[in-house]
Every structure is written in C-alpha cells, then in structure tokens.
C-alpha cells in the first residue's frame, strides 16, 4: 500500500505495541534480536530517527513502514528530516525509498 493520502494518521504507540504482542514480540525483544537498544526502538516509535527500526517493526507486523507511519512517508518514500544527517554531518532533506536507498 503506497501512501498518497497525507491525511492518514500514524498508528498509535499502544496499537503498535498490541500488534507486536499479538505477533509474539515486545519492543525490547525486537530491539535485542536486531542488536539495538530498547531505547532505540522506543524512540523510533515516537520520532523518525531510525529507519532501520521502523523496517524491523513493520516487518514483524507484516506491513510496510509507511502503513504504520504515513506522516513519515510520501508515496512510499521516506521523508528525511532534521533527525537525519548525511556522512558529512549535514542535515538531509531528501526522500529515500523504503529499501533505504536515496531516490
């Protein structure tokens, strides 16, 4: 499902956690499984700082990240924001596709 409607609402954290539990996961367990901290997973739920964690959460739930956080995507592409920095440390304001490659 490609997000073309920017008026869609992001899933609530409680709903995401409930879906994770239904799938037999918790944020802590998912983060640990992927070598990340629980803080990283929790932060990814609140603000768009970890595209990798968004992908892991979505994968466990059997959906795409843009289905969970439509406000973070435009037409299936990740909207980069002030939380993302390029290799030189400057803020990136481009779009990335859901595979993580610059578009």
Image (cartoon, helix red, strand yellow):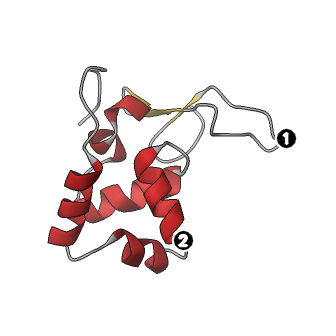
Task: In the rendered view, tell whether residue 92 sits above or below residue 49.
Answer: above
Residue occupying the point 25% across, 61% down: 17
Which one is earlier in the sequence, the residue at label 2 or at label 1?
2
Front-lying residue, 21 or 76 = 21
Circle 2 packing at 10 Å, graded few (<14), some (14-19), many (20+), is some
x, y percentage for residue 74? 40, 25
Task: In the rendered view, tell whether residue 44 sits above or below residue 59.
Answer: above
x, y percentage for residue 11? 25, 43
Residue named by callout 2: 37
> Residue 60's image quarter?
bottom left
Location of the C terminus (image quadrant)? top right
The residue positioned farthest toward the left in the image shown: 22
x, y percentage for residue 72? 42, 33
Task: In the rendered view, tell whether residue 21 sits above or below residue 85.
Answer: below
Label drawn at residue 88: 1
> Residue 6's image quarter?
top left
Seen in the image, is 68 located left or right of residue 22? right
Q: Are marks 2 and 1 in contact (CB under 8 Å)?
A: no
Seen in the image, is 88 located left or right of residue 77? right
């Amino acid at each position: 499902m490609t997000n073309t409607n920017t008026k869609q609402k992001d899933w609530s954290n409680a709903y995401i956690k409930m879906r994770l539990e239904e799938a037999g996961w918790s944020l802590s367990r998912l983060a640990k499984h992927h070598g990340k901290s629980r803080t990283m997973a929790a932060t990814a739920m609140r603000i768009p700082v970890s595209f990798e964690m968004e992908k892991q959460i979505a994968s466990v739930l059997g959906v795409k990240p843009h289905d969970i956080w439509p406000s973070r995507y435009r037409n299936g592409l990740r909207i980069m924001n002030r939380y993302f920095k390029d290799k030189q440390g400057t803020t990136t304001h481009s779009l990335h596709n859901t595979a993580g490659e610059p578009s």
